Amino acid sequence: MWLALTAAAAPRLELVVVGPGDSQYTLYGHAGVVAFDQGDEPLSQARLFNFGITDFRRPNYIVDFLGGRVDFWGHERDYQTYLDRWTRHDREVVRYPLNLGPDATKALLLRMRDRVREETKHYRYDTFRENCATRIRDLLDAATGGAVYGALAGVPTGRSFRDDVRQAYAGQPALLLLTEIFPGPALDEPRDAWAMAYRPVALARGLATVTLPDGTPLLGEPHVDRRREGPDPRTGNPNRAQIFLWIISVVLLAMSVVIVGAPPWARGIVLAGWLAGDVLLGGALLWVALTTAWPDMQGSPLLLSYSVLDVGLFWTAGVFIIRRGERGGRWARGWLWVRLGLSLSLLALSPFVSALNGPIAPRAVGVAGVALALRCAGVGADARGVFKRLLRWPLRLG
C-alpha cells in the first residue's frame, strides 16, 4: 500500500465539519476527514473517514448510553454518498484543506486506514472525550508532532461542557431539563481549547490557530459544500430549564405557606405527592451514579437534595390521610430537619467547593420541597393560631 501511495500523485486530505441537523443526535455537529488518494482527483471520487458510526437501533441503547457502554467505530466510504445524505438532512458542510507535507499526509492516510480495520476500528464512546472529533484531533496531533496539543492545551475558553450542552439542547426543553438535573460537577469545570475540541466547530476553530514548524498554517481556506437552508435547530433559550426550575421552587415555597393550618389529611396528600417525585428522582440519580462509567454523570450533589431514604415518610403521609391525625409526625419532622440542613449546606457551599459545582436551580427545588414537607409534617401548623393570639394580646392589655 505504501508503494502504491508513493508511486501515484501525492494524496490530499481535508477536514470536513458538518453542522447540526434536526435530529437530536446531530445537535453537536460532526467531523470527518476527506481523502483524495491522488491530489487532482475530483470530489466525486473522494473518500470519507468517518469515526462517528454506531447502531442507534441496538437493544437497550438509551440505558447503555447513560451508562457509558456504547461502542462507536470508524469506516471509509465515498464522500459523495455522505454529502448527499447531509444535503437531504439540511446540514451545513464545510471542508478545510490540511496543509501537511507529502510524507506526513501519506503517513496520516495510512494511520487512518489502520484505524478503520475490523480489529482496531471500535472504541468506547464518550461525548466529551472520545468521539468523531477527538479521534481526528488526536490523529492530527500525532501527524504534526504534538503541534495541535501545544497550540490548544492550557488555552482558556471561558466555557464548560455544560455551556455546550445548554447551547446544543436550547431547542429541546425536555432534554435540557434532564441535563440540568443528572450530570455531576465535572460538567461544570472550566475547559481549555484542547478539551473543547471535542465539538467539531471548536475543533476547526482550534486547528485554525495551529502553525506547522515551517510557518504554514495547518488549515487552509474553507470551502463550503452547502449551507443549511432552515433555521438553526438549536434556537431557543438555553436557560429555559433553569427558569422552569426556579418557578417550581417558588410554587413549592408558596405551597409551604398556604398549607399552614390545613387539616392533617390534606397535608398528608400533599406530602405523599412530594414524596413520589422526590423518591423517584432520588432513585434515578442514585442508579445513574452507581451504574455509569461517565465521569460527568457521577458524584451529583443532588443526591443530597433528593433521597430514596425519604420513602419511610410515606408511612407518615398515610397516617395523616387515613387516621386524620399526626401520629408519627415527630420523627418525620426530625428527619426532615436533617434533610433541610443538608440541602441548605449544599446551597451555601456550592460557590466555594468544586465538588459541589452545578446548577443552583435544581438544588433550590430540593430545598423548597423539603420545606414544604416539613410544613406538611406539622412544623408551624399552629402558626395561624399563634398569629391570632398575638393580635388579641394588645386588646387584652387595653
Image (tube, helix red, strand yellow):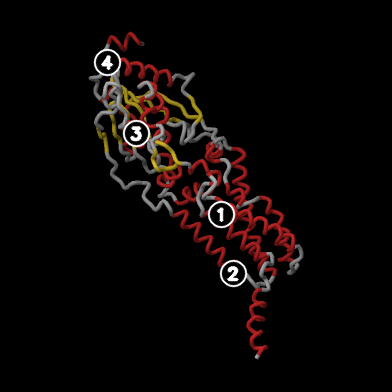
Q: Residue at x 58, y 42 (%)?
A: 299
Q: Which of the numbered marks, if any, corresponds to residue 10?
A: 4
Specify the farthest residue to the bottom.
Answer: 398
| CA gap, disc 4 and disc 2 | 76 Å
Of the 4 image quadrants, the one containing the N terminus is top left
Q: Residue at x 40, y 50 (%)?
A: 171
| Mark closest to the chain's N terminus, 2 or 1 | 2
Q: Which residue is mark 2?
A: 257
Q: Which of the numbered marks, if any, corresponds to residue 348?
A: 1
Q: Callout 2, which amino acid?
A: Val
Q: Which of the numbered marks, if any, corresponds to residue 27?
A: none
| Mark closest to the chain's N terminus, 4 or 1 | 4
Mark 4–mark 1 CB contact (< 8 Å): no
| Mark closest to the chain's N terminus, 4 or 3 | 4
- Judging depth in this view, the residue of 160 and 133 nearest the camera is 160
Q: Callout 4, which amino acid?
A: Ala
Where is residue 265 shown, x and y percent of the image?
Answer: 69, 68
- Residue 215 vertical placement versus 177 (above, below): above
Q: Nearer the viewer, mark 2 or mark 3?
A: 3
Question: How many residues crowd around disc 3 within 10 Å: few (fewer than 14), some, or many (20 or more)?
Answer: many
